[in-house]
Amino acid sequence: MKFALALATVIGMANADVYMHNPRGSNDRNCERNANRNNGNRLFDSQNNAAGGYACPRAVGNEVIQDEDGVASFGAFTQDKKIYYYEGSVLPIEWTNQHGCGPNSKVNCEIVIQYMCEDTADPQINNFWPWSTQKWGPNDSNAGTKVGAQAWRSGEKIASPRDGIPRDANDAATDTIPNNVESAVPSTVETRRFGMHENKDHYDRCEHTERNKGLYTADQRMRRNDQRATRQNPNGNRNGYECPEERDYYPWWHPSPWIDIAVLSNEGPVEPCTSVVLSNGDYVCRNENNQAIADGHTQRCAYYLSHSQNMHGKGFCDATTAGTVADKTGSTAWQQRKWYNNKVDCEANGFLWKEISHSDNLNGISYPVCGQTSFSRVNHLGNAMDDADIDSQNYFEDGGKTYLPESNNANRFVWTIPDIPTVKNGVDGYFDAGMEESYKSCTLRLRYNISTSDFPQWPEEAMESGHGWADNMVNFKNNTKKNEDDPATPLIQDPYIFTGVGDSAAKGKQFVSLAVNTNQYGRTFQDRSYKFAIKPRPSAESCDNPNDNTDCRNADSPKILSPNNNQKIFNLNVRGKRGNIVQTYPSVEYDFVPNRLKLDQNNFIHFQWTGSDYNPRRGCNNGEGGPPDPNDFVSAANANKNSRADRSNIIFMNTMAENVPMDMLGVTDVDEATGATSLATIMPNVPCGSGNTAEKDDCYRAIQRLSYLNQQSDGGSLTLRRGLDCLTEEELDQIKNKNERENHPLNCAKLNAKPYPYFDGGLMKMSQAGKYAYFSSRNNNFSNRDQTGIMCVRDGSGNGCEDVNGVLQDENQMISTAAIREKSFCNDEASDYSKGNNFGAASCIELSESILKEETQASTQADNDKIGDGNEEPCDTIIFFFQQATLEEKIGLAIALLFVGMGSAWGGYYTYNRIQARQNAGKKFAGNTKWKGAKATEMI
């Protein structure tokens, strides 16, 4: 049956990659160490370039080092290494899209943002998904039946969503999960290597249900009957357990495990639509305050919201309550992969049509936000137009929220993390472990659609009243019927277009060839995050530490503060990965997200970030610090190789124009600093520095923790390094090799003793008005890369955070009040033979050295490559300048070359004579042919 249902986004996307930077998008990577991903079919079809994406957020090793739940085991205790967000906190979702979006007349576009947690990825409740061979119905009886239970979880091992964990330090865990039940259940080390977002039942239904044959597929030949075949994927290639039809079209017409967050469109209103009401037979957009939106461009959003599965039921065909799953799976329609995709056919063949929305079972599910995307230009993986800082007043004033700040940052949607839903009364057995347990495992998906205006692609109800194309959307009637020109088809593959009559009749008409790939003419791209958790707001102050539960001073985790419900929490994270701007592209270098914040007093910031130890090797000026790979945690055994690890910290500065910390000691370099003196020095200059004695002490500990990452007392780090202390400055000075010194696993000055890329700085209360600049001492490298930020806390009257030249920034007074710094070991690269010195290495030439009189040239360091797994060797030079050699070296080289030349000449002369002698001997032998006719006896 032709199922002519509108495709509400023609989400089939063109070659316009999309990359998510916060949270970190995988682009279908996992733990490969390569510049390019290993497998673009692992979890989902991204349609993106293989160089994009961030490696898995973990240290190198197996599931003991870090399991699927983010738990790192250290014998007697564990630590949690997974990103989490508090309910109600503000998270900027940032991405770059290649071919533009927003009110850009060159392109039509949509951004669809969704999340999924364990309760919908691997549901416990019956009838949430169709019955399957793994999750049978109530009338089935078999040892494998999963009635009223999760189908895929294996005891404490989560099945979905899961990232996939390497079996050992040499494994990347990038294989595509096989299409069988055994691999979907994470019961062994090998099956836990496979990532799984959508579950096996989801794909089982997809590959047996008839595809929507009412869709426009142009001249593409659909090679499958089922939902695996789409115009964008006509062969139905598999990518994990993702269903291609669900991926390519939004809103989809069947149930999906994804919960909608936002749908953004170039046709959306400037004022976001957050709900719809039915009025005179049409859905009408409402804003956050439940008021009608004056902007005329609301019909597209009204269509999206009224068809979102958050609130609108989606249907599927299943066995009747009196039947069994075998009635379905044994049927001819199922076996021929033509299972019924609509209510009429389903019921006509004796089966039951069911509909389900996410709000049927849960309280707290709301409509997605729908609005206009920011303007971004085409052929550009960069920032969007205009600039607006993340501002607590803008986002929360009068109960409203600014969802889409235009910015000179990457494209951005500011997501208010939802409260964990509660199960509705009367819904039994939804998730026995509790919704908090379910929301410990979530993932985020962002899809980017671009489409053309060469033909109408929207249903009438998604277009404004009176639009000329309102009732002309292309559908199956416009598909090419034959392998030739078809007048009903708007475009065919690589068409010829006539442009003129030609210079003469004899020469023929003029025509050009267009680069048109009809399976990409209207195309969907996507990126997905690694797993994260959503947690309830803390209700009481506490320490989460097995070793010290008194004052948290030596805790592995930060002290947990407890904001009240009126105090807002803003997430401050780190984006980017190790490498220079060319090597990281289309990802980005390190930066804070957001790097500008305007806050009110008593707001909170949650400092937290992660990275990966699976990056390509980057060193020299392209990446700072270790630890090395492999890491033995105690020695410099592998420290002379370029490292892979991401690490970041936060140290406060006096102003953004500086690149050194503020004074954090309050003493001279000959005095001994005391905690009291240091605390008194810091408190007036940090945002948490006001309050009672206990609050100031909490603030001081938090500042120290952010700057040094708790390396001296971290229980996990101390266990791995067998209790060894951080290297002292004197011990570091004794390591003469710069790379070994900077990558040594006990070099805490480079943050190397932090064995994991994840760090939780905890909540900090913004109690003191002022502007506060900060930077990462490890990654901020003036004139190479900038990892700095600024936060501003308004005073009691709401002032003090006014923009300067349209941007939140402080004043550059050209004054440095740097922290007390002792001179570190002098690494004489400027005068050392064959060492690169065009990167600003300090010279250590003694005063007694002679002043150079001859011309000199700088050696150029070998930049790390952008392919493979990086460059293992540290700071190689790629050009040898003869002028740099000493006179003795030049004489020695000349003599060596003379002997080489003489030897080569003699060798050539000798070889020539040998060849000539053999050729002459051959001629003599060739002239004696009597032996050819001789008898055998004559030859004895």
Image: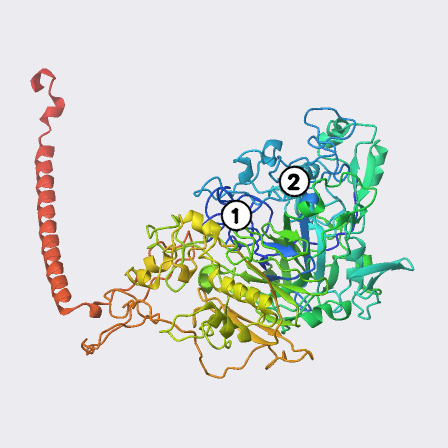
* Residue 319 horizontal/vertical position (percent): 79, 32
Q: Which residue is mark 2?
A: 199
Q: Please give left or right for residue 535 compared with residue 854 in the image.
A: right
**Rendered position, 453 above or below 195:** below
Q: Nearer the viewer, residue 401 or 901?
A: 401
Q: Quadrant of the C terminus?
A: top left
Q: Nearer the viewer, residue 917 or 205?
A: 205
Q: Nearer the viewer, residue 448 or 750?
A: 750
Q: Quadrant of the N terminus?
A: top right
Q: Please give left or right for residue 18 compared with residue 585 in the image.
A: right
Say which label, 1 or 2, has the lower sequence index: 1
Q: Residues within 10 Å of mark 2 (few under 14, many from 20)?
A: many
* Residue 820 horizontal/vertical position (percent): 40, 73
Helix, strand or loop at label 2? It is loop
Q: Which residue is mark 1?
A: 30
* Residue 423 horizontal/vertical position (percent): 78, 46
* Coloration mode: rainbow
Residue at the far right in the pictured view: 280
Q: Residues within 10 Å of mark 1 (few under 14, many from 20)?
A: many
Q: Look at label 2 and name its amino acid.
A: Asn
Q: Please give left or right for residue 531 compared with residue 842 in the image.
A: right
* Residue 118 horizontal/vertical position (percent): 67, 44
Quadrant assignment, res 69: top right
- Could you tell me if residue 469 is visible in this image? no
**Rendered position, 320 above or below 453:** above
Q: Nearer the viewer, residue 346 or 353?
A: 353
**Rendered position, 442 above or below 127:** below
- Could you tell me if residue 289 is visible in this image? yes
Residue at the far top in the pictured view: 937
